[in-house]
Image: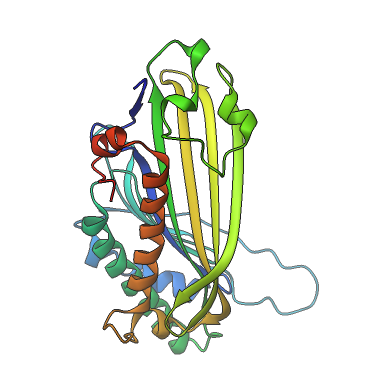
Amino acid sequence: MTFRPVNPRNAVLEAVVLLHFDRPVLAPEAAAVRALHPRVKHDLPRLDELQVATIAFGPAKPSLPPGAPVSMASFKKDGTLETRVLLHGPLLAVNFLLYTRWDELWPKASAWIRMVVEALGEAGTKNGLPPLRVSVCGHQMINVFVWEGDGSGVTVKELFAQKPHRLADAAWNAAGQAWFVVHSANEPLAVEGVHAALIDSLSFDLAEEQRVGWRLRLEQTLEARFAEPLAPEALIAKPLEDGQILIDTLAGQLHHRSRKLMRSLLPAEMLERIGMDAS
């Protein structure tokens, strides 16, 4: 096979878990999250924040300013980002750029998300802020495969077991040229007690990069968009019938769907190479 995974043991360039709130985080809430850093300093030693300024025009009294983005992160030996918890506006994201196993990384992400959401809720109550609710729970997987053959003949037919139904014929038949394809699907999400739509966006991106050569980037973004924004306690505290909290159930379902996609795309030889069984 002419393609190889970007990493020795897997093809994952980055895995992301994210929450979208129904409004931007405000200054007292961001300050409460920043104060959590001593609790996670062992895993995320670096604390960064961007300075923001608010300028008001007119006689109206300015509203409470938005919170400055908060980033708690660790870095690889080469100085590039390894793991990060980022709070920015209405977004809370956990990024993993040194991927091992989902069962190893998700418990960390789940604990950090719960800790941040609890701190946001306490700060909001203490400061009399409008309730902060969750409108989207998302999961993104970015897989990369590098072409090792002659660039003039680069073709995804060398990677995929068969033509993906989400890939345009022109891209499937192309050879030696760059292209980009996006496919999205929308369907109901079946989770106990939750009314949500599942948005499944998949992009195929074949391009040539300096010092890398030709590479195929598969980026799948899965979002559970709730019909009505959820109170944080419904997401992180209230257990379902199976005993799990909702955030764990949602993330597990989204990740399972991501794995199912890769199994449908790749032949057994490549699945074994990236540490994923074909079942």
Vertical arrangement, residue 240 with respect to residue 95, above or below: below
The quadrant holding residue 158 is: top left
Expressed as whole percent of the image width and height from the top left, the position of residue 190 reads: 47, 75
Q: Is residue 68 visible?
A: no
Residue 240 placement (x, y as % from top left) = 33, 85
Instruction: Please give left or right for residue 253 compared with residue 220 in the image.
Output: left
* Residue found at x 30% / y 62%: 109
Please name the residue shown 45% across and 69% down the image: 30
> Residue 37's image quarter?
bottom left
Horizontal relation, residue 75 to residue 234: left or right:
left
Image position of 209 with respect to 275: above or below: above
Front-most of residues 226 and 253:
253
Q: Residue furthest right?
A: 58
Identity of the residue furthest to the front in this view: 162
Q: Which quadrant would the N terminus be assigned to in this image?
A: top left
Q: Nearer the viewer, residue 198 or 230?
A: 198
Residue in the foreground of this view, choosing between 68 and 216: 216
Tell me, yes or no, if residue 218 can be seen here: yes
Q: Position of residue 267 (x, y in %)?
A: 35, 36
Image position, residue 126 (x, y; %): 43, 88
Residue found 37% across the figure and 50% down from its top: 15
Give above or below for 245 relative to 74: below
**Quarter of the view holding residue 13:** top left
